[in-house]
Amino acid sequence: MVRRIDTYLEQLLPDEKLAFYESVRDFADAEIAPHLLQWERDHRLVPDECIQAMGQLGLFGLPIPEEFGGQGGDHTDLVLMGLAIGYHSQSVAITPGAAISLGAKPILLCGSEEQKKEHLPALARGERMFVFGLSEPGRGSDAANPEVTAVKQGDKWVINGEKCWSTNAAWASHVVVHALTDKDAPNGKRSTCFIVPMDEKGVFYQEMQGKKVWEQSSTGSIMFENVEVPHDAILGNENEGFKVMVTTLNGGRLFIAALALASLAFGLDKCRIYAEEREQFDNKPIGRFQRVQDVIVDMDIALERGITWLMHCCNLYEQNKLAREQAAKVKVDCSRTASELIALGMEICGGVACFDEFGLIRHHNDLFVTRVGEGSNFVLKDLIVRPLRGR
Ligand SMILES: Cc1cc2nc3c(=O)[nH]c(=O)nc-3n(C[C@H](O)[C@H](O)[C@H](O)COP(=O)(O)OP(=O)(O)OC[C@H]3O[C@@H](n4cnc5c(N)ncnc54)[C@H](O)[C@@H]3O)c2cc1C
């Protein structure tokens, strides 16, 4: 069975990019898909051997330049990896996805030459992993004003507070902490980013319990108790931490859109095949009913539109022309449309869609994260409306 998403990607991608997508797709089919159900039922995070296998494929170093030991690829490769692995599991795809788009990218985009030399080769090999410490228990959407503080003491900074929702925390070697450094400065200029090793004295991590989405992905709380770091731990410039975070999120939102489309692509294939297999009334397939066809056709339209739009945004991103609101728009639309359609897709399949082994419920649950992660859709509309109001 040819996946519908492959038909569209074949039309949109140059040969080299298509070959890369197909190689990751084949890896995910062989090494991830057959084990997923058991990992879910055993409540396991992505197993170490799977992380190592993804590392051997070079997935942790995709957009890192070859001079730093990476694959020398681009952001589009990262998005294609998200489509290929996310087709089976968003929570496996987000592991290398966040390691790059939220972990390595801040160093690539805002790091000094010394920081790049120190961290990028190990990040590319998957031996180090950085997590993105923006969200806090009391600061989600209002991320520009962290409650975590960093206070200058002589030639050091002392960090206190708590970060949460940190993807990949279980495997992290370092966390990029977004901390308040000048509470009296204008909004957006009050914070600084620091690179903090997870084994630094005073850093404590625990896995957040009870999460029923992205179940194979690690999501941690990280506490900081009088953690001392040197001045050169600053990433970017002092009091420009929010700029580091926002710059990083532009590319991250394209990856989230890819995860949403990957789930939609899986849902479309599952529903169209099941609709031809399942027979009701006169032993004929339910796929002959127009109301069933309606949902399948809407999924197909949304997939073709979303993939075409996402590839367009990737092209703009590679040329440094992607506006923040454009990344936000494609993320908002793909996540909202895919999650609405997957619920309808489940409905046309009937009761069988409740079962984990049918696969749709996993994507249904994971799609929720694409609506709130990397900026909730409602909050992102504030960004999208600005140019419409001439601001
Ligand atoms: C599985 C998962 C992984 C994550 N990984 C990371 C990570 O690696 N690093 C990280 O830093 N964060 C991470 N996050 C956090 C994520 O970015 C936040 O959940 C998101 O920014 C929203 O913040 P919040 O959940 O605190 O919601 P809140 O800020 O409390 O907002 C709740 C809701 O209120 C509404 N709302 C709030 N403000 C406004 C407004 N101005 N206008 C309109 N509506 C508004 C929206 O509907 C919003 O969804 C992760 C989250 C999840 C679920």
Image: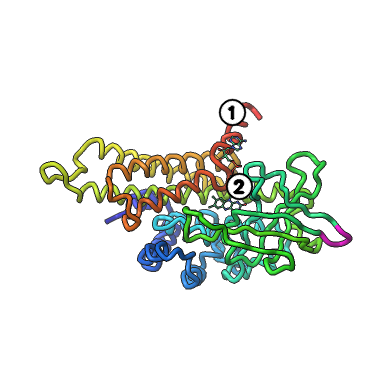
Q: Label 1 neighbourhood size at 10 Å, few (<14), some (14-19), many (20+)?
A: few
Q: Residue at x 40, y 63 (%)?
A: 41
Expressed as whole percent of the image width and height from the top left, the position of residue 352 reads: 28, 51
| 105 on left or right of 186 | left
Instruction: Specify the farthest residue to the front.
Output: 210
From the Cβ of disc 1, is ligand 1 less than 8 Å away?
A: no
Please identify the quarter of the rendering in which residue 300 is found.
top left
Residue extent of the magenta highlight:
153-157
- Residue 320's disc is 2
Expressed as whole percent of the image width and height from the top left, the position of residue 338 reads: 41, 43
Closest to the observer, 52 or 116: 52
Mark 1 and mark 2 lie on one chain; the one further toward the N terminus is 2
Element under label 1? Answer: helix
Q: Residue at x 59, y 43 (%)?
A: 321
Element under label 2? Answer: loop
Q: The C terminus lies in which quarter of the figure?
A: top right
- Under mark 2, the amino acid is Asn
Q: Nearer the viewer, mark 1 or mark 2?
A: 1
Closest to the observer, 16 or 277: 277
Instruction: Kindly tell me whether residue 318 is visible in this rendering.
Output: no
Please identify the quarter of the rendering in which residue 116 is found.
bottom right
Q: Main secondary structure of the magenta part?
A: strand
Ligand 1, image quadrant it occupies: top right
Discs 1, 2 touching: Cβ within 8 Å: no
Q: Residue at x 34, y 38 (%)?
A: 298
Residue 3 magenta-highlighted = no
Location of residue 250 with respect to 130 vertically, above or below: above
Instruction: Kindly tell me whether residue 182 is visible in this rendering.
Output: yes
| 152 on left or right of 217 | right
- Residue 388's disc is 1
Calculate the distance from the C-alpha at mark 1 to the C-alpha at mark 2.
21 Å
